[in-house]
């Protein structure tokens, strides 16, 4: 089996996430220049956050997150000082996106 980073269906290294102080966020496909998902996020524990995505604009979840709802609980953790891991889980699917603070 090919390494997941070589499989275009699973590769997510092109997604950038912007988070504002008011809790609004935007994920963007930096290669295509298209929005992925946007809305507001709320940290409700030290392990979970809630994404409330706008469906008025584009709602095109990242690869392996395609079945996510517009309001979705996501597991998260901060790794080191500059990395945010966000994990979407549904049934047998568990997919983690890694974002590095810039």
Image (cartoon, rainbow, N blue to C red):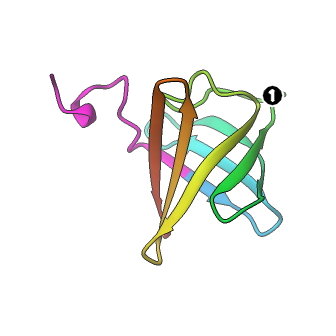
Q: Is residue 56 above or below residue 42?
A: above
The residue most toward the bottom is 81
Asked whether, in this view, residue 52 is left or right of residue 29, the answer is right
Q: At numbered mark 1, what does the secondary structure look like: helix, strand or loop?
A: loop
Q: How many marks?
A: 1
Q: Nearer the viewer, residue 12 or 42?
A: 42
Q: Is residue 23 above or below residue 58?
A: below
Let me know if residue 46 is in the magenta part: no
Residue 15: percent from the left, percent from the top? Answer: 48, 44
Let me know if residue 4 is in the magenta part: yes
Magenta stretch prevailing secondary structure: loop
Q: Is residue 71 above or below residue 39?
A: above
Q: Nearer the viewer, residue 79 or 37?
A: 79
The residue most toward the front is 91
Residue 96: percent from the left, percent from the top? Answer: 45, 44
* Location of the N terminus (image quadrant): top left
Image quadrant assignment for residue 12: top left
Residue 76: percent from the left, percent from the top? Answer: 57, 56
The residue most toward the left is 1
Q: Identify the residue at horizontal 61%, vertical 35% (top origin).
A: 36
Residue 28: percent from the left, percent from the top? Answer: 57, 43
Asked whether, in this view, residue 99 is left or right of residue 6, the answer is right
Q: Identify the residue at horizontal 76%, vertical 30% (top origin).
A: 70
Q: Which residues are magenta?
A: 1-16
Q: Identify the residue at horizontal 55%, vertical 35% (top origin).
A: 89
Q: Identify the residue at horizontal 26%, vertical 32% (top origin).
A: 4
Crowd around label 1: few <14 · some 14–19 · many ≥20 (10 Å):
few
- In this figure, which residue is indicated by the disc labeled 1? 55
């Amino acid at each position: 089996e090919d390494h997941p980073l070589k499989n275009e269906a699973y590769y997510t290294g092109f997604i950038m996430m912007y988070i504002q102080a008011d809790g609004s966020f935007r994920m963007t496909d930096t290669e295509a220049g298209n929005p992925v998902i946007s809305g507001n996020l709320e940290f409700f524990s030290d392990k979970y956050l809630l994404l409330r995505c706008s469906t008025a604009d584009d709602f095109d979840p990242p690869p392996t997150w395609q079945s996510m709802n517009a309001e979705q609980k996501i597991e998260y953790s901060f790794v080191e000082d500059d990395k945010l891991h966000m994990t979407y889980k549904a049934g047998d699917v568990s997919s983690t996106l890694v974002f590095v603070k810039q």
